[in-house]
Amino acid sequence: MQKRNSKSGALGLAVLPLALAGAFTSAYAQEAAPPAMTAEEKAIGKKIYFERCAGCHGVLRKGATGKNLEPSWTKKDKDGKEISGGTLKLGTARLEKIIALGTEGGMVNYDDILTKEEINIMARYIQNTPDVPPEFSLKDMMDSWKLIVPVDQRPKQQMSKVNLKNVFATTLRDTGKLALIDGDTKQIWEILDTGYAVHISRLSASGRYVYTVGRDGLVTLIDLWFEKPKTVATVKLGSDARSVDTSKFKGYEDKYLVGGSYWPPQYSIMEGDTLKPLKVVSTRGMTVDGEYHPEPRVASIVSSHIKPEWVINVKETGMILLVDYSDINNLKTTTINSAKFLHDGGWDASKRYFLVAANASHKVAAVDTKTGKLAALVDTKKIPHPGRGANFIHPKYGPVWATGHLGDAVVSLISTPHPDPKYAQYKQYNWKVVEELKMPGAGNLFVKTHPKSKHLWADMPMNPERENAESNMVFDLTDLSKPPVKIDVAKDSGLPVTKALRRAVHQEYSEDGSEVWISLWGGKTDQSAVVVYDDKTLKVKKVITDPRMITPTGKFNVYNTMKDIY
Ligand code: DHE
């Protein structure tokens, strides 16, 4: 996903065909020396690149959701020409414009985040050879591991009266903290320190432990059985990470945790209740096109309910790994070819098929975890971004799974197989996009519904228009021909308008499916809120705000996350 949207500038990178990405060899020899940089400027460039650019372009800058940014692309020729051997050479002035204004290809504008000097540093930094960060071994993990409260010193039962199943683990992104909010009382129960620019949380199969991962690779294990939630262990997965999941198959509950890293490109297996590192597996290797890739990052990970298995999606190679964790010393892995640039995804309603966006390939791959084979590769609109998607019964086409798109103003509904014979009549539609629901604009990140709900919620936080970015669209699942209702979440919060957009992002249902919680992702220092809606009436039920409520984004209801309900 792109962090922010372009204002309007249709510059350079947007028009570069991806196919040209590798066509630089002949021109390479004629390239000029990279622009000079002082050690201090290099350090600034390195930090900004990690914080702002690496997520989309990769540490080695080979490109994924974002374009390839290797010097072969970014540097001008020795003679100052921009085009050489079929390759567009960008150079400092052009790169400065792209960084400042963004592109229509999805590159965001940084002119109101970075100073002019920083933009100039970045334009020069990316013409220099990429810094290669150090590897991170099992020993490095072990050295980083902190067991703060050993298992025998933890409570033997839940100490508080809080309804744990309805607790929401809420990301406070830019503060590097996690708020544990009591869903029944809507009170903040505890706020705990986590990793830098904390990303997602997942639950152990029992619902006792919350695992949170930061972009710096720090995993935090939180025990909900204390009177107040407590961090009982931490460990580093590497220097850059996005995903974790637990072992959910019967007999393995709370036993293992698996974490996926962006850098180094690998996944790591840990003890579920202590985070003691057990094994590290590299994901470097060949892409679906048969080319070696040095940085195939681990994107989404999900734990199977029907087998002792994780589905591990490797972004740059387009390989989906089914990793059998029943014997981690003799790890059995099924490697499934799908499409490049795998990102986020979720289960179908039966939890047999995992559907994952191959975002820059504009496809959704569906893997059949029962047979261990690719079930389908479905063409979608531009840059599908489902979050975990949304499952419901379409009035005409039966069971469907929904995904929105970052690059297009539609939510696509893909027909999915279902074991219940009453849905056999819909088999003819399976793995087809059966309907596209119109949105007011692109920039969708998440869609959500609940088995008890008649509504489908879709956000647009990456849309450039304030009125779209701050709203959600709600579709009536009993009559999809009705225009969706637009809910202005920022306005409903009652908070003062701020200079920064307050992006209405990520929906999560309460345990009983009666409420929808939406975050307002505001400015880095602005007090913000989570707005709670009654899912039936679409009226505001509660605005959860607090001076510490800064940049709330993802929310993970304990029960729904534990059971993968969406
Ligand atoms: Fe995410 C899920 C990667 C930016 C909020 N994000 C995911 C997943 C991946 C991913 C691989 C799937 C995890 C899984 O299921 O195991 N996200 C990335 C990036 O690489 C990216 C584009 C850029 C970056 O540098 O990190 C990125 N993500 C963001 C944000 O800026 C968001 C909107 C705000 C934030 O808090 O960081 C954001 N991502 C989320 C959320 C989920 C997520 C809330 C989980 C959704 C769910 O319902 O499970």
Image (cartoon, rainbow, N blue to C red):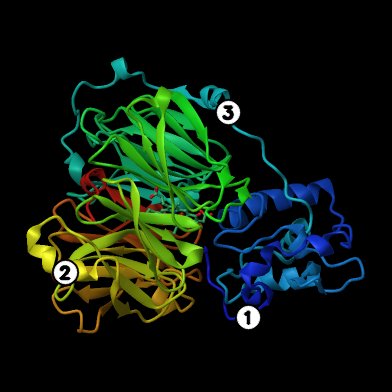
Is the distance from the Cβ of mark 2 to the nearest ligand 1 atom less than 8 Å? no
Secondary element at image label 1: loop
The residue lying toward the viewer, choosing from 76 and 474, is: 76
Secondary element at image label 2: helix
**How busy is the neighbourhood of tag 2: few (under 14 within 10 Å), some, or many (20 plus)?**
some
Quadrant occupied by the C terminus: bottom left
Give the residue number, with chain letter if any, for mark 1: 10
Disc 3 versus disc 2: distance between alpha carbons? 49 Å
- Reading the chain from its start, which is encountered first: label 2 or label 1? 1
Is 38 left, or right, of 10 in this rendering? right
Amino acid residing under circle 1: Ala
Give the residue number, with chain letter if any, for mark 3: 137
Give the residue number, with chain letter if any, for mark 2: 426
Amino acid residing under circle 3: Ser
How many marks do you count on the picture? Answer: 3
Residue 27 % position (x, y) = 83, 64
Residue lying furthest left in this view? Answer: 422
Disc 1 versus disc 3: distance between alpha carbons? 43 Å
Q: Quadrant of residue 494?
A: bottom left
The residue lying toward the viewer, choosing from 408 and 173, is: 408
**How busy is the neighbourhood of tag 1: few (under 14 within 10 Å), some, or many (20 plus)?**
some
Residue at image location 44% in from the left, 24% down from the top: 278
- Reading the chain from its start, which is encountered first: label 1 or label 3? 1
Where 66 sits versus 195, above or below?
below
Is 119 left, or right, of 515 in this rendering? right
